[in-house]
Image (tube, rainbow, N blue to C red):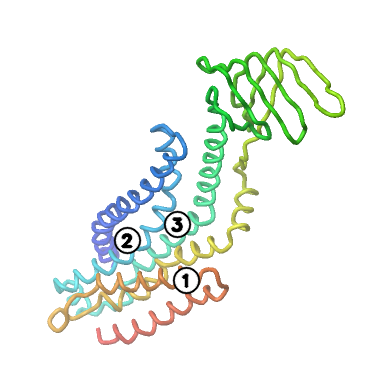
Amino acid sequence: MLKLDKYLIENFFSSFFTLFAILFIIASMVFLLTISNMTAILKINIFEFLYLYILTLPEIIFYTLPLSFFITAAFSLSKLFETSELITILAIGVSPKRILKPFFFISLFFSFLLLIITFLSIPTSNILYKNFINIKKTESQFNFKPSEIGQRFGNWNIFIEKKENNNYKNIVLYNNKQNSLILANSAKTYKKDNYFILSLYNGMIYYIDKQTNIIKFKKLNINNKIEIDNLTILKITKYIENNKEKITKYFLISLFPFIAFFFIGTISFFHNRYEKNHSIIYSIIISILYYFIVFITYKHLYSILLIPLFISIGYIIERKRIARF
């Protein structure tokens, strides 16, 4: 029986990696297109582009792995029925449940892997993705252009007369909330920890109230904090709490390999003399149906009932279907 398990598993994975690679490439193209659209708003280099793509890998794997498992499992088994190999094995007394046993453990492994991705990898990648976007948005505000009106730095309106390399000349800042004005001969910007800092040199601060107060300075730093979430277990837990609906959707999809196992025998067991092989079509239809129902119900509490509902339907149909083998 161990030889049978090994043969079925090898047959499965020989097709699985091919289909997974195809779906992975298709999903990657969609995510790459999304990232490329972002370059119209934010300036990123090739390494930052690749970094964002790497952060999307958990979601790409998440959406392609369940489909690859179900379609490949149904395809690999049905092919063995087409060649009468499994019919011969059934004829010598091996039960259908024994043939399906290796796929049960594979489905458990894939569902467990997807649960890890759901509760750890996806929150982590999304936090890092959001941090990167916040940094780039804040950074874009530091690209001050000379002689341009309407530029802002935090709560300050800023005007720059000249720019030489990374240094600015003759800077004017005005804060209408504090009713204050800053004039400086030069300035430069840099990032430190979670702050973008504007350093002003050799200038004066004018506090305009009932009377004007003037303060001279040689160096003045104005800090602008970047909204960054530190990557900790607490932050991941908080992300899950704040995105319960999204996590519910991921949770339901992560269990799809285990749920799909109860349909594998139904769509892949057939007599090649009397029936045609429609396993791929059926597996695609069942996958689309499950994903569709998940996407329209995941915001509601009753969506969790999809798990016992699909398992019950698959189990009942499978028992009737494979009873004749």
Give residue 7's position: percent from left, percent from top.
24, 62
Residue behind mark 1: 296
Give residue 110's position: percent from left, percent from top.
41, 60
Residue behind mark 3: 113
Residue behind mark 2: 68
Contact between labelled residues 3 and 2, with CB atoms less than 8 Å apart? no
Give the structural element (helix, strand or loop) at label 2: helix
Q: Is residue 83 left or right of residue 279?
A: left
For residue 149, above or below residue 19: above
Instruction: State which tag comes first along the sequence, 1 or 3.
Output: 3
Residue at 17% x, 71% y: name it.
85
For residue 143, above or below residue 230: above
For residue 62, above or below residue 156: below
**Mark in the foreground, 1 or 3:** 1
Total tally of numbered discs in the picture = 3
Q: For the residues marked 1 and 3, what is the alpha-carbon distance in whole angstroms?
A: 24 Å
Residue sitting nearer the eye, 126 or 58? 126
Residue at 54% x, 69% y: name it.
299
Instruction: State which tag comes first along the sequence, 2 or 3.
Output: 2
Quarter holding the C terminus is bottom left
Residue type highlighted by circle 3 = Leu
The image's mark for residue 269 is: none
Farthest residue in the front direction?
210
Give residue 107's position: percent from left, percent from top.
39, 65
Q: For the residues marked 2 and 3, what is the alpha-carbon distance in whole angstroms?
A: 14 Å
Q: For the residues marked 1 and 2, what is the alpha-carbon distance in whole angstroms?
A: 22 Å
Residue sitting nearer the eye, 136 or 99? 136
Quarter holding the N terminus is bottom left
Residue at 28% x, 58% y: name it.
16
